Amino acid sequence: MGKNISILIAVFAISFTKVSAQDSKLDKLEMYFDQGHYRLTLRKSKKLLRDSTYKNHPLPYMWKALSTAGIGIKKSKSLTNRLIESTAYFQTFSQFEKAGYYQQTYRAEILNYQEIFLNQIAELKPKKSKLAKELFFVYQGTFEDPIVFETIELLQSPETINTSSKISSKKLRNKVVSEAKNHLGVPYKWGGTTKKGFDCSGYTSYVMAKNGISIPRIAKDQSKIVTKVNTKKVQPGDLIFFGNGTKVTHVGIIVSRPGENLSMIHASSSKGIMISNVTSSSYWKKRMLFMGSVIE
């Protein structure tokens, strides 16, 4: 009996070590990608896929797709070809049973990937319309996005956002909150940026844009361009960010005034656009990271 228990413990130890090693290797792909080492991410992804342990895991395929697109950005002349190449890897990733889970986990990265596509299509449209349409058909076959070719315009990338161009106006804050409340009840839609459905950052960027304020599309990038404010000084129209650890996963717009219970309007994945009391919610309180302003 004791011998059998020892064997079971040994097997468990080996299994645990193996799982930990898997996690470590997958985490490194994310680290390399976040640091902008796209060629290294691609090389390491390919290496993992030659290992039978990882062959049936969706993440190496996802990082392979995203890093291929990243390489194209650094060498703009090859971007169109790199994007087309990347879709084969992303489509393989999408076929996995757990793809939906990872699409939520790495939502910001995938949305940025989609924006790279749309920007490239927009840049090709004026002089290379046929190639732009070909790339658009590839995009449609890869992502569930109802966007129409004629409506695609060049998006402002996070790198071009100038945080010093904040707009000073007390009236502007009221206009932002008013615009935000106009969409109460609109359903949640993953990747949504229109009145037919919003996700959290699609909603905040839409509301700000309606008031002449240009901010990045993705919550993580929005968090990088704000001027941070503390709870006592936060005002209506400021942004509030949430996440696990330090990673931003959700954003809302403050609607409460100083001295009131902290409240936000946001795109809830279960209820759509709604107002939530952050102060009285243990769920939001423990996930709150910080608040910031794009309005002086």
Image (cartoon, rainbow, N blue to C red):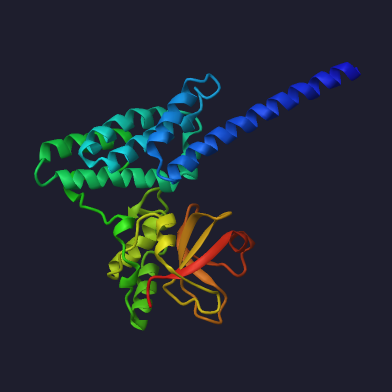
Q: Can residue 104 be seen in this snapshot?
A: yes
**Residue 130, position as x, y percentages in the image:** 11, 36
**Residue 120, position as x, y percentages in the image:** 22, 44
Q: Is residue 91 left or right of residue 276?
A: left
Q: Residue at x 43, y 41 (%)?
A: 33
- In front of the other: 293 or 48: 48
Q: Quadrant of residue 149?
A: top left
- Total of numbered circles in the picture? 0
User: In the picture, which quadrant includes the N terminus?
Assistant: top right
Q: Residue at x 57, y 67 (%)?
A: 278
Q: Residue at x 52, y 38 (%)?
A: 28
Height in image: 158 above or below 135?
below
Q: Can residue 195 be seen in this snapshot?
A: no
- In front of the other: 38 or 121: 38
Q: Residue at x 16, y 39 (%)?
A: 132
Height in image: 225 above or below 149?
below
Residue at the extreme left of the image, as rendered: 127
**Residue 139, position as x, y percentages in the image:** 27, 37
User: In the picture, which quadrant includes the C terminus?
Assistant: bottom left
Q: Quadrant of residue 182?
A: bottom left
Height in image: 226 above or below 153?
below
Q: Is residue 246 left or right of residue 139?
A: right
